[in-house]
Amino acid sequence: MNNHVATSRSGDGAPHIERHLFGQLASGERVDEYTLVSGSGVSVDILTWGGIIRAIRTPDKHGIVADIALGYDSLSAYEKHHPYFGTITGRFANRIAKGLFTLDGVTYRLATNNEPNHLHGGVNGFDRKNWRATASTSADAATLMLSAVSPDGDEGYPGEVRTLVRYSLARDNSLRIEYEATSSKPTPLNLTNHTYFNLAGHDTGTVNEQQITINAESFLPVDATLIPTGVRQSVSSSPFDFRKPRAIGSRIKDVGIGYDHTFILESSSSGIRRAAMVSDPISGRALEVLTTQPGVQFYTGNYLNEDKSGKGGASYKQHSGFCLETQGFPDAVNQPSFPSCVLRPGEKYNHTTIFRFFTKD
């Protein structure tokens, strides 16, 4: 664990970082929480354990600050089975059908921790690692760099994977997340962040009235176990059409218990594309998501179940938060028509996602 924290505070409004002990694992290993401060009204708490974004404090249109990320107050709550609140998910975010894939003629078996499929890297994925942290500040941003090594065979995956995730909170109140990785053997890799947002405040009920736009002409239909069928379907004339702003809950009942689907993002010549924009009509808080990834998984907290152990005793019920998980396509290792998710020796995995926080009248 790196014990040095740069805390540049020269002048009012300078980005800075604070650190404190959040808890200890059963092994006695320390888990730290870093608070990144933009200097312009937004701050973000990040844990070394799971790389978890534990809190995001943003002002509304009247300057009233609220925490818009669902989460817990204690390490023990995160150590119990939880719905990936704020985590780095990997090695493979989303699902791999039946926990099986064949790569270069070798078949690999993974945990089926979301029966009958493999989900988010398995039983002890990247969401349960205690990452090594290095913090720094500049005139423009506060940055936390997290690194971890996943050994060959970890959760059944081939190759030793070395991963770096860089969180940078800038003066313009944008949180930039950069992912880098290398592998000693060919392996599927698909990393994302799994923050649950509620722009009215994490403890204010459902997100059904918040307005969302998704920059996608098509999406991936799924079977009963949430594995893509392989078809790319137009969003036109369907409950999946968010090309213009629409309340999240306006047609949610038409898709069963809620959305848990990958939307195929429109390409951009610059490499980074606008994935989505969400706003809360009452508070005026808004979130823009940009990414270099080809897809975004829109998930509406369908399996939240009113567990009252949320921060401050909050009760998180179904649809109390939404996720916008920028990523490659689910089950891509088994579906040749999808963009490749295989990282090979000598290659570098990298992608960038930006969450920009602002207000609307």
Image (cartoon, rainbow, N blue to C red):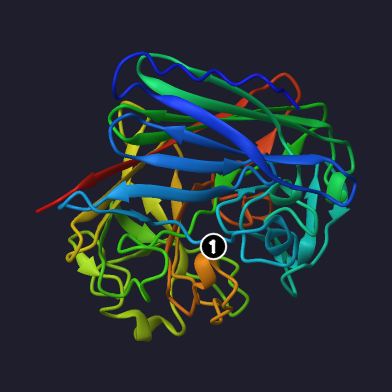
Q: Position of residue 78 (x, y in %)?
A: 68, 59
Element under label 1? loop
Q: Position of residue 43 (x, y in %)?
A: 40, 40
Q: Position of residue 55 (x, y in %)?
A: 48, 50
Image quarter in which the C terminus is found: bottom left
Q: Identify which residue is drawn at 77% across, 57% down.
A: 122
The kind of residue on which mark 1 rests is: Gly
Report the residue marked by disc 1: 230
Q: Nearer the viewer, residue 311 or 324?
A: 311
Determine whether, in the image, residue 187 is placed left or right of residue 64.
Answer: right
Q: Identify which residue is drawn at 58% across, 71% down.
A: 226
Determine whether, in the image, residue 136 is placed left or right of residue 21.
Answer: left
Q: Position of residue 215 (x, y in %)?
A: 28, 51
Q: Nearer the viewer, residue 44 or 64?
A: 64
Determine whether, in the image, residue 160 is placed left or right of residue 356.
Answer: right
Is residue 62 placed above or below 343 in the rendered structure? below
Q: In the current view of this chain or complex, which residue is farthest to the left?
A: 361
Residue 306 lies in what quarter of the image?
Answer: bottom right
Image quarter in which the N terminus is found: top right
Is residue 128 placed above or below 164 in the rendered structure? below
Q: Identify which residue is drawn at 42% across, 14% down.
A: 138
Q: How many marks?
A: 1
How many neighbours does mark 1 have within 10 angstroms: few (below 14), some (14-19), or many (20 or more)? some
Residue 132 lies in what quarter of the image?
Answer: top right
Is residue 32 placed above or below 316 in the rendered structure? above
Determine whether, in the image, residue 63 is placed left or right of residue 140.
Answer: left
Residue 346 lies in what quarter of the image?
Answer: top right
Is residue 198 placed above or below 101 in the rendered structure? below
